[in-house]
Amino acid sequence: MLLGENLTSCLFDIDSLWFSSLFENVHQPWQVLERIQGYIAAFPKDGFEEYKEGVYVGRDVEIHPSAVIEAPCIIGAGSKIRTSAYIRGRVITGENCVIGNSSEVKNSVLMNRVQLPHYNYAGDSILGNFAHMGAGAICSNLKSDGSDVVIHSDIETKTGLRKLGAILGDRVEIGCNCVLNPGTVIGKNTSVYPLTSVRGVIPENSIVKSQGIVVNKL
C-alpha cells in the first residue's frame, strides 16, 4: 500500500456503495471530504425520504428519539442511529451502519456495515466496509498546533487539510479506547489492540499490538 498509488482502490471496495460516484477519479481518499456537502445537495434522493430538512434516510433506518442529526446528511438503508448519537452534518453512510450510544460523527464517510457503537468519535474520517471501532475509540482530526495534517510514511504526504481524522480500510478492527491520530491510514483487514495510540500508515493484514509494534497476520 503506497501513497503514490491509487490508495482508494487499495483500501476499499466501492462498487457496492450507493454513493460510489463520490469516489470517481479520487486516488487519495481524503480528497472526498471536501466533496461531501456538494454531493449531498446534488444527489437524486430517489429511494430516500426526508427525515427532516436536509437529512435523508433510506428504507428501514432506525433513529432513536434522543439522537441529534444535523444537515446535510444521508443515512443508508437498514442503518441504526442509537441513543444520544450526534451526527453534526456533512455525513454520508452506507447501508446497515450503526452509530451508537453517545457516538459523534462529522464531515465523514461511512461505507457499508460500519459500526461506531459506543462512545466513539469520527471527525473528517473515512471508514471502509465492515470497519468496527471498539468502545471509546476515537479518530482525532486536529493536530495540537493546528497545522495542516501530513500523512507519515516512507514519504511525507501533505494533505492541505487542517482537519483530517483516520482512514480505515475495509474490515479494519479498532480495539477499545484507541486513539487514531490525525492522518492515520490503516490498510484492509488490520486489527489494532485496545489502548493503542496509532499514527502514520499501517499495512493491510496486520496486527498493531502497541505503538510501533506491528506484525503481519499471515
Image (cartoon, rainbow, N blue to C red):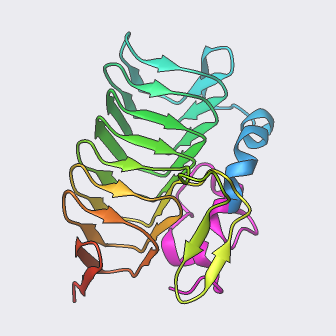
Position of residue 13 relative to residue 144, above or below, is: below
- Residue 89 location, quadrant: top right
What residue is rendered at 19% in x and 58% in y?
A: 194
- Residues 88 and 19: in front is 88
Residue 169 at x, y = what percent? Answer: 44, 67
Residue at image coords 24%, 76%? 207
x, y percent for residue 107: 61, 41
Residue 163: percent from the left, percent from the top? Answer: 62, 50
Q: What residue do we see at 56% from left, 63% from top?
A: 14
Q: Is residue 170 highlighted in magenta?
A: no
Q: Residue furthest front?
A: 145
Question: Is 79 on the left or on the right of 74, as rendered?
Answer: left
Residue 27 seen: yes
For residue 96, say whether it is visible. no
Q: Is residue 30 above or below residue 110?
A: below
What kind of secondary structure does the magenta stretch mostly adopt?
loop
Q: Which residues are magenta?
A: 1-30
Task: Looking at the picture, tell me which residue is in the foreground, 162 or 169.
Answer: 162
Above-or-below relation of 144 to 38: below
Q: Is residue 51 left or right of residue 218?
A: right
Total of numbered circles in the picture? 0
Residue at 43 percent across and 33 percent down: it is 104
Say left or right for 202 vs 91.
Answer: left
The reply to whether the magenta stretch includes residue 3 is yes
The quarter of the picture where the C terminus appears is bottom left
- The picture places residue 151, in percent across and down from the top left corner, at 57, 72
Viewer-proximal residue, 31 or 61? 31
